[in-house]
Image (cartoon, rainbow, N blue to C red):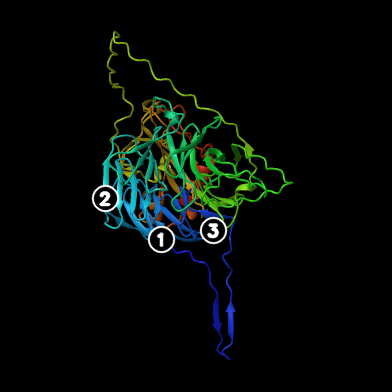
Amino acid sequence: MTRRTAPRRRVVVNGEGGARRTILAPSAGPRDELALDDCPLAIARSADARHLIITLPYEVWIVDAKTLNAQRTIPLTMARPSVAEGWEGALWIGGQHLYRASLNATSATKTGTKLGGYVDHVSLIRDDLLCGVGAQGELLWDIDRQGPVHKRKSTGPHAVEVVASADGRGVFCDGSPTAWVIDPAHPEGYAQLRLGATSPVPVDHEGIVCLGRTEGSRGGRVLLGARDGAVAWTSRDLRLAGERVPTAKRDMTPLALAGDERWVYVLRRRGVLQRFLIAQPNVAKPKGSKRKGNKRKGAPPARAQQPDELEPPPLPEAQEVRLAKLATCMTLVAHDGSDDTKRTLLLGGPKADGQLGRLWTVEVESLEWQDLRLSQRTLAEPPPPPDPDAEPPAPQRPSFIATKNKLAGPKISEICVDDIVGSARARGVDYWLTHGSGSLLDRPTERRSKQDTLPGDAVLLPAMVRFCEGTARPALIVWPGVVEDHEGPAPAPRVLVWGDAPRAWMALETPQIRAQKWSRTDVFPIQVAVAAVPEGLPGKRQALDPKWVDQAHFEALAKECKKMLKVLW
């Protein structure tokens, strides 16, 4: 990837008389918004507060914190990387493997062996100790010795996030109502951390799915967010200090958490931002008052209240605001030498239907906050003890009903482009059936009728696309399906396009786009045209964008593609 640098001035010396002439390039001043090549996953500030570390799918961006100008990018091969900053600008990047990079470089080097499944999420809990969690278990990695000092294989739920506490311990969550604490001094046993209002039996909506910490290099408090919207925070010694439960009216799953000594900020879906009060501000008593307050050691001096000045009204317990743009991640920045009113939120979110992303800043006090009502959790009752005289339930028999077809046709990579843009399309090639799992281009295909389609079959639809730079190309839409009682949402559709080098079908993802020597801004936002979508297919499938179904647009793009010499097959 090319290195992005700010333009510099040039000094030109003429031949006659040696006159000096200075050419000033336009300066890279601060901007309100930075366009990203994909929807961001996380935002973090560097230890020196000069850079922003933006985590994207398959990439990490290093951005100037003052001007929001991109400085360099680090290409990766992981769809959801996790980044932690180490000593002297070193970056530890987790995912399928553990990589080491730097704030001042554009490459990453693989570190360690047999770490897959243990470093899906990483966090630096000490200067020389890295904590990693994943689908296989937990790991403590000694940076100086380049080896693990603790490694535990887990068969429970997959860990979803990990943060470092102020006292050098790691806190991770796995979607259950309990967060787990790893102490490097005693790694043989994990401590539990859960909200005070937690049911005695496991409840899915009480699961902790998001973690955060207050501002600082290591953070003062650990923040916990549950699926039902409940938020809790700890003290510096990881003791539960407070919790709030807002009134739930919609999906309250938290996307990101941030905070300072006054507020805890929670980002939710649909651009909703909430904040919860940790403590009321301290107001100093006027001079001459005999009442003595408990002055905390190391606390900032409070503004003295004048005798004729009224006490400020107390701050509300919870507030809410809807952002002007959708956001998926955030971090809080406190300006040096400012009071509690000067806070800036760095937000990242999708753009162009999630195909691109953006980064922007918002002043906290410039938002139109509204009061938010709080409630209490309704705890689930434990089940009654089993009746000793009751008959045991009958064993559940497995179901032998077929959910997907056994296909043995040609692979997806062998589908001819003429079946989409040529005369074969006029003969009625509506769609193919393929498998919903396996290597994408090696999946078999067969032409079947709608009556022969089963819930677990993936449908392969012929399509046409137009890139942002204007090229029309043949495409295939992989539309997977699952059975009706499948837990969780159905898989998202995937787009395949015809590439140039090599001339073959390719997934429209960042590694394949990078291999074609394209850029994501040349490809996205993309126009998709499908001639028709079969209705009444069995199974549970994600709905396709209605704007995609346009037969006239499909035929126009196919006619244009056949006349272009740029797209060959």
> Nearer the N terminus, badge 3 or badge 2?
3
Residue lying at 52% horizontally and 67% vertically, measured from the top left = 6
- Residue 31 in which image quadrant: bottom right
User: Identity of the amino acid at label 2?
Assistant: Pro
Q: Amino acid at mark 3?
A: Leu
Q: Position of residue 178 (x, y in %)?
A: 39, 34
From the image, state whether disc 1 or disc 3 is nearer to you. Answer: 1
Lower position in the chain sequence, tag 1 or tag 2: 1
83 over 440 or under it: above or below: below
> For mark 1, what is the residue?
89
> Is mark 1 in CB contact (under 8 Å) with mark 2?
no
Q: Where does residue 422 sit, x and y in percent of width and height?
A: 42, 44
Q: Residue at x 64, y 51 (%)?
A: 303
Circle 2 is placed at which residue position?
Answer: 148
Lateral position of residue 411 relative to residue 375, left or right: left
| Residue farthest to the front, as pictured | 290
Q: CA distance from mark 1 to mark 2?
A: 22 Å
Secondary structure type for disc 2? strand
Contact check, label 3 and label 2, Cβ < 8 Å:
no
The alpha-carbon separation of the residues under discs 3 and 2 comes to 37 Å
> Which of the pair 494/99 is nearer the observer?
99
- Residue 68 — which label? 3
Residue 371 image point, x, y percent: 63, 36
Q: Reply above or below: 459 against 33.
A: above
